[in-house]
Structures are given as C-alpha cells and as structure tokens.
Image (cartoon, helix red, strand yellow):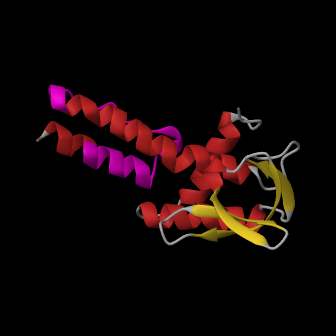
Amino acid sequence: MSTWAPAALEALIEEATRDAYGEDEQLTGFFTMIEESLVVPFTTTVLGVEVSVVGVDLAEDARVVARCARGTARQNIGIVDLPLPEPAPEGAQWIEAYRIGPAELARRTTAQLSCCSKGQSPRLPLTGPTAGNRGEMARILANACRHG
C-alpha cells in the first residue's frame, strides 16, 4: 500500500507526462524524474537477500530498472517490482507514481475498451490525472470504438 496521498501521486504523474506525446515520451518523463529525484544508494531486500540499489536505467525493453548490487554481483530489477525499504528513500514517491501512472492507464483502457465487443461505448477517464495527452488518446480510442 502506498504511503503517499493519491492526489500527490496524481500530481507527480501529471508532472512527468505533461509534455509527453506517446508512451515513449511518457516513459522518458518518468525515468528522468526518478533518475533526478531518487537518492541512491539505498538498501532494500529482494527475495530475502539484502541488496544495494545503486542507480536506475532505461532498459531496451522500455522499462525503468533499478541497478542492484550485492558484493560483485549486479542485477537489474524492474522498478515496479522493487520492494521499497521503510522508510523509503528520498525520491521514492516517483517510483510509486510510475507504478500507478502508465500501468493504471493501460489497465483502465483495456478494461473499458472490452465493452466495445458488446456494442457499448467505453468509459475512459477524460479528466483529472488522465487529462492532456492521455485524455486526447482516450477520446480517439473512444471514438474509434464507437464508430467501429
């Protein structure tokens, strides 16, 4: 469960994606905010093993990953799968915003577009944290679904 208020996370999502055109630029926006804000190194536990998070990268498969180290071993872990320690390091709110940002938009879009097969219009959120570019995408998808 998130320790940050939903409104605060929505504001971070908006900040990271404000000028983004498309998913690639949204990803870059989140990566930039995480890279600039997350204070590293910090220690966390992954699969029962203590590791040091020494940085973040943008992986070739379009994921933000945490660069983890333990002794001489190195491993990248998807930032959405990274357990955060208590207390969370400074800047970790950007990880939480990333976890719910693009992933939540994709979940809502998939769930709401499934109604198209039943001849109904999708109920995509067009205001709030999905306004702007994502809102425009939602309108385009909704119109495409309505008009076949």
Front-most of residues 125 and 118: 118
Front-most of residues 137 and 3: 3
Indicate the position of residue 17 as horizontal and vertical percent values: 54, 58
Say whether residue 1 is magenta.
no
| Quarter of the picture holding the C terminus | top left
Indicate the position of residue 117 as horizontal and vertical percent values: 17, 31
Say which quarter of the image contains residue 108: top left
Q: Is residue 67 above or below residue 113?
A: below
| Quarter of the picture holding the N terminus | top right
**125 to the left or right of 46:** left
Say whether residue 137 is magenta.
yes
Residue at x 55% of width, y 70% of height? 59
Residue at x 60% of width, y 60% of height? 30
- Residue 121 seen from this side: no
**17 to the left or right of 82:** left
Residue at x 46% of width, y 46% of height? 131
**67 to the left or right of 40:** left
Q: Is residue 81 above or below residue 66?
A: above
Say which quarter of the image contains residue 66: bottom right
Indicate the position of residue 33 as horizontal and vertical percent values: 67, 63
- Residue 66 seen from this side: yes
Q: Is residue 146 above or below residue 59?
A: above
Front-most of residues 42 and 73: 73
Indicate the position of residue 74 as horizontal and vertical percent values: 73, 70
Front-most of residues 67 and 118: 67
What range of the chain is rendered magenta?
117-141
**140 to the left or right of 26:** left
